[in-house]
Image (cartoon, helix red, strand yellow):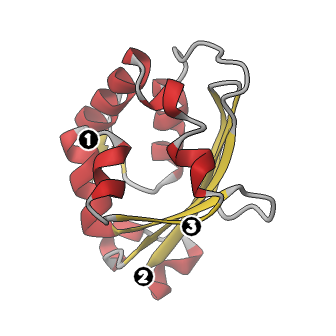
């Protein structure tokens, strides 16, 4: 698996590829909008039109425990909004940390149906497959 610059199209593809081993988990569903703020201009790159604003939005769609879509932008029908400061997202990804650590320490802010993320994805987030996914991202994400 090749490395990819964080928040680029190639990085979204890396996520999708790394999540391909997730087994189906019926009822494990969540649509999440992410916003990474305080993104250094050099890190956000020219393909992100909001780079001048120092924030980069993207979304993730998980259906039946499978990652079915991840891309730049924002969805109107998301269950939850997740905001990270760039430095906090970098630390979480680089360390391969469980998302609960960021949430419990206040580095991840949730808005909307937070229970969808915190409790609804529990079977996925606590799985060996998700631990492997986090490890792949840690090894293959460039900042």
| SS type, badge 1 | loop
Who's the residue at 42% across and 18% down the image? Answer: 129
In this rendering, position of residue 39 left or right of residue 75: left
- What number is the disc on residue 62? none
Residue bearing mark 3: 57
Residue bearing mark 1: 97
Who's the residue at 69% across and 35% down the image? Answer: 29
Q: Is residue 82 above or below residue 100?
A: below
For the residue pair 103 and 48, the one nearer the viewer reads as 103
- What number is the disc on residue 54? 2
Q: Is residue 100 above or below residue 90?
A: above
Circle nearer the N terminus (1, 2):
2
In the rendered view of the protein, which quadrant contains the N terminus? top left
Per the model, the C-alpha gap separating discs 1 and 2 is 24 Å
Measuring from the top left, give residue 82's x and y in whole percent.
52, 62
Could you tell me how many numbered marks the image carries? 3
In this rendering, position of residue 30 left or right of residue 129: right
For the residue pair 78 and 101, the one nearer the viewer reads as 101
Who's the residue at 56% across and 47% down the image? Answer: 117
Instruction: Please say if the residues under marks 1 and 2 sit with CB atoms less than 8 Å apart.
Output: no
Mark 1 burial class by Cα count in 10 Å: few <14, some 14-19, many 20+? some
């Amino acid at each position: 698996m090749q490395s990819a610059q964080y928040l680029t199209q190639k990085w979204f593809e890396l996520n999708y590829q790394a999540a391909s081993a997730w087994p189906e988990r019926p009822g494990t569903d969540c649509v999440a909008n992410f916003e990474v703020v305080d993104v250094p201009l050099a890190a956000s790159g020219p393909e992100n039109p909001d780079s001048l604003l120092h924030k980069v939005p993207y979304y993730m769609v998980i259906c039946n425990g499978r990652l079915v879509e991840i891309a730049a932008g924002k969805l109107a029908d998301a269950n939850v909004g997740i905001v990270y400061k760039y430095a906090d997202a970098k630390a979480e990804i680089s360390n391969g940390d469980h998302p609960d650590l960021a949430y419990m320490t206040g580095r991840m802010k949730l808005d909307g149906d937070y229970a969808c993320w915190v409790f609804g994805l529990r079977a996925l987030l606590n799985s060996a497959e998700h631990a492997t996914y986090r490890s792949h991202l840690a090894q293959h994400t460039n900042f």
